[in-house]
Amino acid sequence: MALQWVILAYVVAAEAAVAIFLTLPTPKAVKSRIVSLISLVLQPSLFIIPFSAFQLLDIYWKNEHRLMCTGEICTAAERDRYEKSIYKSQRNAVLCIAACLLYWCIYRVCKYYREIHSMEEVEKRYKDQ
């Protein structure tokens, strides 16, 4: 596995852990601190979106220019190598899509929590009046 795919796999694992951590039920004080910390980290970690898009374009380009091994002239080893490269590219495409989707989910959960928090403050102000 090349270095960029190892990095992407670790980023996807970290995003999955953060998403699980965000959705766990916790007290409001702890949850607000967690969300504020993750919100601070979200903007610098936006690099994952263009990185994944570039990797998807690379997968597409390699798929379009890959030598086909479908005829009778291919040996068993060549056919196995061809299938292995197809499986690897599918795995890498799933990694790229998962990275983007998990980033989006984390972003939306943080945004929803901030909106709920602001609505609760508005409701508290109206009750105090």
Image (spheres, rainbow, N blue to C red):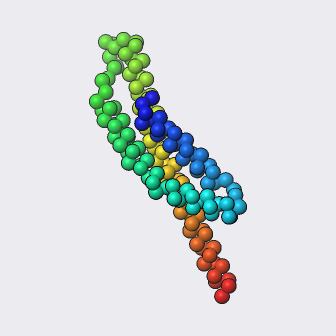
Residue 50 x %, y %: 38, 48
Residue at image location 33% in from the left, 32% down from the top: 63
Residue 4 x %, y %: 42, 36
Q: Is residue 12 above or below residue 67?
A: below
Left or right placement of residue 76 versus residue 126 in this view: left
Residue 129 x %, y %: 66, 88
Q: Is residue 44 above or below residue 29?
A: above
Question: Which residue is farthest left?
Answer: 65
Residue at image location 46% in from the left, 38% down from the top: 7
Snapshot quadrant of residue 79: top left
Snapshot quadrant of residue 76: top left
Residue at image location 36% in from the left, 35% down from the top: 59
Q: Quadrant of the N terminus?
A: top left
Q: Is residue 124 above or below residue 90?
A: below
Residue 119 x %, y %: 60, 73
Can residue 26 be seen from the camera position used here? yes
Snapshot quadrant of residue 55: top left
Give the tally of numbered discs: 0
Residue at image location 31% in from the left, 27% down from the top: 66
Left or right placement of residue 54 versus residue 95 in this view: left
Left or right placement of residue 118 versus residue 67 in this view: right
Question: Which residue is farthest bottom?
Answer: 129
Can residue 92 be seen from the camera position used here? no
